[in-house]
Structures are given as C-alpha cells and as structure tokens.
Amino acid sequence: MASEEYEYGDRFRNITNANMNQGGTICAHSFSNLTHSSPLVFLYLLKECYVHGTLKATKKFRALQQQVMLALHNSPQPGPSSFIIHCLYLLPIFDLHCEGLSHLIISSLRRYLKATTSSLDDSKAANLAANLFIDIVLGLIKHDERIGIKILEVFDVRLTNIESAFNQFKDKNDFQFDTANSFLEQYIFTLIESQSYTLAVALLERFSIRQSGQSFLIRILEHNEFMAAEKWATFMGKPMLCTLIEEYVKRNKLKFAYEIIKKNNLQPHFPDVYRKCKESMLRNLAEKALWDVAEKKAKGDSKYIEYLVYLAMEAGYYEKVDELCDRYSLEGFSNNKEPSENLQHSRYLHLNQLGIEDVVWVDDADGLLEATRNIEEHKLIGLDCEWKPNYVKGMKPNKVSIMQIATDKMVFILDLIKLFADCPEFLDHCLTRILQSPGILKLGYNFQCDTKQLAQSYGKLNCFMRYNMLLDIQSMFKELRGGLSGLAEKILGTGLNKTRRNSNWELRPLSQNQLEYAALDAVVLIHIFRVGSQSQSNEGHVKNGWKSHIISLLDNSKKEKKESKTKKDQEIDPN
C-alpha cells in the first residue's frame, strides 16, 4: 500500500508541475498544502489521478482515499468537513466521474473524522450538508440519492439542521411544504413508491419518523429487502421484530428468523421456532461435515447434543456418536447402530465395491520406498490429501496431514507429518519420482487447491513445486453439483459419504473409518475417469479429449500454471 500511496502522491505533484509549466495558476503545493487551493483545483487533480491511474479499480480507490485523507490534514479552508461539502457542490460538473469521486471523498472524510476530534467546522458543515441534501432532493444539485443519504450519515445531520436549512430556503423561495417534517415525509414516500426501501428506512430511522407500520414491513419483505426490513423492525422495537420473525417463518426463512431471535434475546417468545431454526442450522453444518463447529454451536445444551448424536447415527459416523456420548455422558444410543449401518452401506460407495485389496499406512522410509516402487509400476494413479480443519477466522490452515495415492488394487496413505519430520530428503526424493514422472497420469479433483496447500505446508520440498501429467477430472465434466460425491453419483451411480471430511486428520492412529474414507477419495478418481472417459467416447467425443485437460504446474511457489496438450500419445494410454 505504501508504494501505491507514493505513486499517487507523486502523480499529484507531476500534474501540478505540468500545469505550472503551461502557465497555469495551480500552486506547487496545491495538494500537500490546501490553504490557498480551491475545491475546484483539488477535484481537478483528483480526477486526473483517477483517470490516468494504472492500478486496478479497488487498489486505485484505496490509494486515492489515503491521499485525500492526507490532504484533509493539510489545512483545507474553511475546514476539512466544509471543504468536502464545497467539493460535493462542484462535483456534478465532472459528469461521468461525479458518482465515483463523490463516494471517494465522502469515504475519505469518514475515515478522517474517525481519527480526529470534533471541531467547530463539524457543526458548521452539518448545516451546509443539510442545505446540500435539500438541494439534492429538489434536483437543484444532481447527485445520486445514495450520495444524499451518505451525506446525512457522515456529517451527522439532525432534524434541527434540516429545519434550519428548510426555513432559510422557504424564506427565499415559494415552497409547497409548511414544515421540514412534511418535506421529509414526502421524500420518503417518493422513495417507497420507487421501491428504494433501504434509503427510505435510513431516513425514517435517522429522523425518528414512525408513521409506517406492519404493512410497510411486509412490503419490504415482498421485494426481498431483508436488511432494510431488519433495520426498520429494530428501529420500531420489539413488537415489530416479533412480526418480522413470524413473517420469516411463514416464508421458510428460518436462518433469518434464528439470527433475529438470537440477536434480540427473543428465545422465550419463540421457543419452538428457535429450536427448529437451531436444529436446521446444526443439520446444515453436519451435512457439510462441520461437526466441530456444530458441537460448538450446541453450547453443551443436552437436547442439541443429543440431536447431533442422532445426526451422526443417521450419517453412519459412529466414532462421532461414541465421541459425543463419552464427552457428555449420554446413554442409550449404542444399541441403535445396526439398522443405520445397513442403510448407509446401501446409500454410499464402499472400498470393497471398487476392487481394492489393501490399504497401506506409510510412515517410515522402508514403507515409503516400497510404496514408491509399487506406484511406479502403474501408468494411472489417483491423488488426494487431507488436513485438520481450522475454524479460527484469519488463521492459516493446518499442515497437510496425509496424502493418499491409489492404484488399481491398492491405496497408500502417506503420513506426511511424520515422514517430513523423520526423513524429509528421502520423502522429497520419492515423491519427486512420482509427481514429476511424465509416464504416470495423476488424477485429482480440484487438486490445484491441494497443490497450493502442500507447497505452503512443506515449502522446503521440491516435490511439491513441480508436477507432470496432472489431470483434474473436475475439468472433464461440466455443470456439476455436489463436489466429488456428486460426480461419483453421476458417473458411477452412487455417491460418497462425506461425513468425515472435516474430522481430525492429525490423530494417530487414524480410525478405520477415516482410513477407508481417505482411501475411497483417491481410488474413486480412477473409476470415475475410466467410466467417464469411455462414456464421452461412446457419445461421439474425441477419444483422447481428456488429454487436452492435462495441466503442468511448473513452479507452484510462484503460482505459475501452464496448460499443456500431450504431444506424444504413445507415452501413456491408461485405458
């Protein structure tokens, strides 16, 4: 950001000097010292930087915002807030740039005011802002209505400011409104009629106008303006919030209802709705395999913990059932497992259906060497990785814990954490032989995410910096939903049980269910590839069309990606 600010500060100086060389009257310090600079000169310089800036839009906006904030510290006259008001009066002459520059200088002032104490200029600016708002409403100054609302917010314009500006305007002009209140109410009515509900609610709240009621709330909801509806109901108070919750329940917007109940402590008023919403949220988390998050959301409440146990049983996640029962001393669930196990077996793919003879855990050099030799004998393998989820916002993901490599008959599960600790150089050597081999086609699903995570976890290893013959089968099929499980269901007729996706992959030893889950994610790629590519060939697609999707990641540390078509078909033909 510092370089961006320097670029734009330097650009201001260059523009200033260019104008001086052309005989203009712009002072050499027109940006760094605003004591003798007019708002028009300031806006001209700002517009030139905006037009000729080379950064992308968001970075450009932030860099210019920082420059405007610095400028507001440099004695603009008659004061920073008043100076911005004068700029806003002038901005409509800049036509196409008016709206963008308005948002820019208003947001800059907002940040400036947060960092400084209030002054006499602020109170004067509030009256000027009220005048500007009235001029915008009457169409005397052309600004977007959203700019008018922002002006009220940033300059903290109150009803007294509006009344003062209104009376001054009324004394000088023939005006149809008797009071400032009637003027505001008519403007709000106009906004409502044009379905600008967010703006209307902002004005009703700011000026404490409570004339609209339940019919207004329902009208907002009918146009799906949910944020405006919540803001209006919160302003109106508890009865309107209760009405909003009831309307959300009618519309099956349980998540919205739950958030409002929780935020406003209305659980005693809606116990059944709250429980239903809570259970729906827990079910959604469980279906996404976010069991730890779901347990945290349950907050130790026995009825919700028991509900999680039932969800785990329904999903066939029996180690989670045992874990929850042990942790919370729950009894009476162990005898109910058998029927669910049979049901789960029929609903999802299992390893024994895919011809796998053995799943081998690899955590030492001898096992790694044997696995490497076995893998190198095959022309087609499936790859996948797992790592412990991290639910702390802003924290880096945990290290990749295991890598699964599947052949036709075997799946090798590499304990990357232990192998990296015990024999990093040998791990690098063996995986380089596999991942960078031009004679082995490596199948993955959205594997570029895994390669990025591998490089971040084990940056010292060269094996994760370069890949040859990597095929992401996700790219072979279009319009897919449901991730790898959805793809398996479409191509093979049966999906995958993903309930263990976000389990703790750093546990040692892993449970048998975890091992089977991990192995299945790798081996199913081979079956999807073979069945899917054969199906495409039968439907008239080019026989070797999948080869056009092969990707080589030449330097993962620099995120250089290059798509390459295979030039030598004879190198590999896994079919």
Image (cartoon, rainbow, N blue to C red):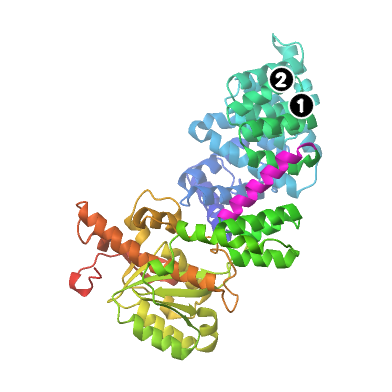
Marking on residue 207: 1
Q: Residue at x 27, y 59 (%)?
A: 533
Write the start and end of the magenta stretch as one range: 269-287
Name the residue nearer the viewer: 347 or 195.
347
| Residue 241, percent from left and from top | 74, 32
Amino acid under label 2?
Answer: Leu
Element assignment for label 1: loop
Q: Residue at x 42, y 65 (%)?
A: 447
Relative image position of residue 497 (x, y in whole percent): 49, 60
Residue holding disc 2: 184
Distance (Cα) linking label 2 and label 1 = 9 Å
Q: Residue 412 at what x, y percent from top left?
A: 43, 78
Prevailing secondary structure of the magenta residues: helix
Disc number placed over residue 545 in the picture, else none: none
The image shows residue 303, relative to residue 175, as above or below, that is below
Q: Is 530 colored magenta in this rendering?
A: no
